Image: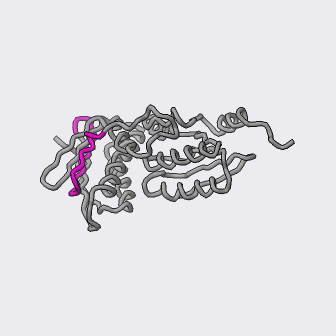
Amino acid sequence: MEVIEEKQNDIYIIKPKGRLDSNTSPEFEKKIFEIIEKGSRNMIIDFESLDYVSSAGLRVILKVAKQLKHSDGRVILCSMEDYVKEVFEIAGFDSIIPIVPNRGDALKNFEASQIPSRDP
Amino acid sequence: MLENTVYFCLKNRLSELDILSRKLEAFGNSCRLSRKHLLEINLALEEIFTNIISYGYVDNADHWIKIMFSTQNGHIIIRIEDDGIPFNLVKTEKPDFECGLEERPIGGLGVYLIKQLMNDIVYERDGNKNILTMKKKFTVGR
């Protein structure tokens, strides 16, 4: 599956395209964990180009959220279409992972919580 | 009476999922199913299909999974028949949603989603077959 990767300051923005199902999720998981291994702690997953998600996709998002929390980072999800948002809500993910309307809101959310630079 | 009935068989291979989605899309278009309902039914079908191929068989042989789509009194009817080990998904329990991110279980979500998205689910065991029949009330639309 196609995944667009961008970096803004220290925030990685991941944009999966098409369908996140049992066939495509393993590849998505591999790509996203490669990015986490590069040292990314703060991540936005932008769902603007995602048409479909199943529990296989939800599992990857849950693993990512757990992993980032473990390394004192976090993930924010944004720009979901109605169907995708509905699936996240039914699965109860909206109470454990922040979901915001668009990328701008996600970036603001990170800025607001940014720890001041540790460099003197 | 069932209307617009479509029957087909798929092998117990993950690669058949794309065929399943395409067949459903063609059926959905023929009865002018809304996109949201199409995606919801697609999700239920994928969860059931992957469950069967992941946990249903104790051998490595090829098996056929029989699928039927139909409509009846404003409902979409989906019937899935497999010859795997008995599995009654109607009787499974809701995953624990009370806990926080770190404790949230990874499994059990698929079956829970099916139950939330379909209006009626009936399980039967007939000889060596699991037969699952699901209904969803549908609206014609975009």
Q: Is residue B4 visible?
A: no
Please tell me in which quadrant of the rendered image residue B73 appears.
Answer: top left
Q: Where is residue A34 shown, x and y percent of the image?
A: 61, 58
Which quadrant: the N terminus of chain B? top left
A115 displayed left or right of B47? right
B112 displayed left or right of A48? left
Q: Residue at x 44, y 39 (%)?
A: A87
B121 displayed left or right of A48? left
Q: Where is residue B35 shown, x and y percent of the image?
A: 42, 42
Q: Is residue B78 covered in magenta?
A: yes
Query: Residue farthest to the right?
Result: A120
Please tell me in which quadrant of the rendered image residue B137 appears.
Answer: top left
Question: Closer to the camera, B117 or A57?
Answer: A57
Question: Closer to the camera, A65 or B32?
Answer: A65
Which quadrant: the C terminus of chain B? top left
Question: Closer to the camera, B28 or B55?
Answer: B55
Q: Which residues are magenta?
A: B72-92
Tell me the colour scheme of the image. one colour
Please tell me in which quadrant of the rendered image residue B94 appears.
Answer: top left
Vertical side of B79 occupied by A81: above or below: above
Query: Residue farthest to the left?
Result: B127
Question: Closer to the camera, B131 or B3?
Answer: B131
Q: Is residue A72 covered in magenta?
A: no
Q: Where is residue B58 shown, x and y percent of the image?
A: 26, 61
Vertical side of A10 occupied by A98: above or below: above
Q: Where is residue A98 shown, x and y percent of the image?
A: 57, 35
Q: Residue at x 67, y 34 (%)?
A: A109
Q: Residue at x 32, y 49 (%)?
A: B48
Q: Residue at x 68, y 53 (%)?
A: A39
Q: Is residue B127 visible?
A: yes
